[in-house]
Image (spheres, grey):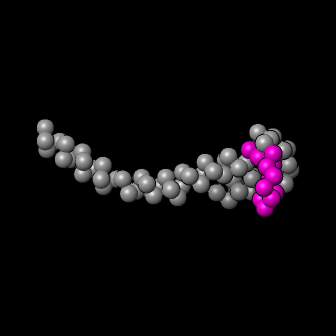
Amino acid sequence: MNRKKQERRFVFLSLAPAIILIGLFVMYPTINIFVMSLYKWGGLSANKTFVGLNNFKILIQDQNFIQSFQNTLLLI
């Protein structure tokens, strides 16, 4: 039983730095960008207005976005 605990501890300690780095450099910015997308904000001012998913609704209706998205999918 003691050997199993040591193996689990080794695996945990081996994976912990990678998990921390992924959380810090991938997960946190991704979540932060999604939260920022729910606001109408110029980027420099302190005034933020919560608009929810309205930004995505506007984006889907934009013909330039649709064309660029299709081009991206074609290139991929």
Q: Is residue 56 left or right of residue 73?
A: right
Q: Position of residue 49 (x, y in %)?
A: 81, 45
Residues in magenta, as a range? 38-49
**Relative to residue 1, is residue 25 depicted above or below?**
below
Q: Nearer the viewer, residue 44 or 70?
A: 44
**Relative to residue 43, is residue 2 depicted above or below?**
above
Q: Quadrant of the C terminus?
A: bottom right
Asked if one can make out residue 46 in the rendered structure from this viewpoint, the answer is yes
Q: Position of residue 60 (x, y in %)?
A: 80, 44
Q: Nearer the viewer, residue 39 or 54?
A: 39
Q: Is residue 66 magenta?
A: no
Q: Position of residue 2 (x, y in %)?
A: 13, 41
Q: Quadrant of the N terminus?
A: top left
Magenta highlight: main SS: loop
Q: Report the residue that reaches farthest toward the bottom.
A: 44
Q: Position of residue 43 (x, y in %)?
A: 77, 59
Asked if one can make out residue 55 in the rendered structure from this viewpoint, the answer is no
Q: Nearer the viewer, residue 57 or 22?
A: 22
In which quadrant of the rendered view does residue 17 lie?
bottom left
What residue is drawn where x is 59% and y is 54%? Answer: 29
What residue is drawn where x is 66% and y is 52%? Answer: 33
In which quadrant of the rendered view does residue 56 lie?
top right
**Tally of marks:** 0
What residue is drawn where x is 84% and y is 44%? Answer: 58
What residue is drawn where x is 73% and y is 48%? Answer: 37
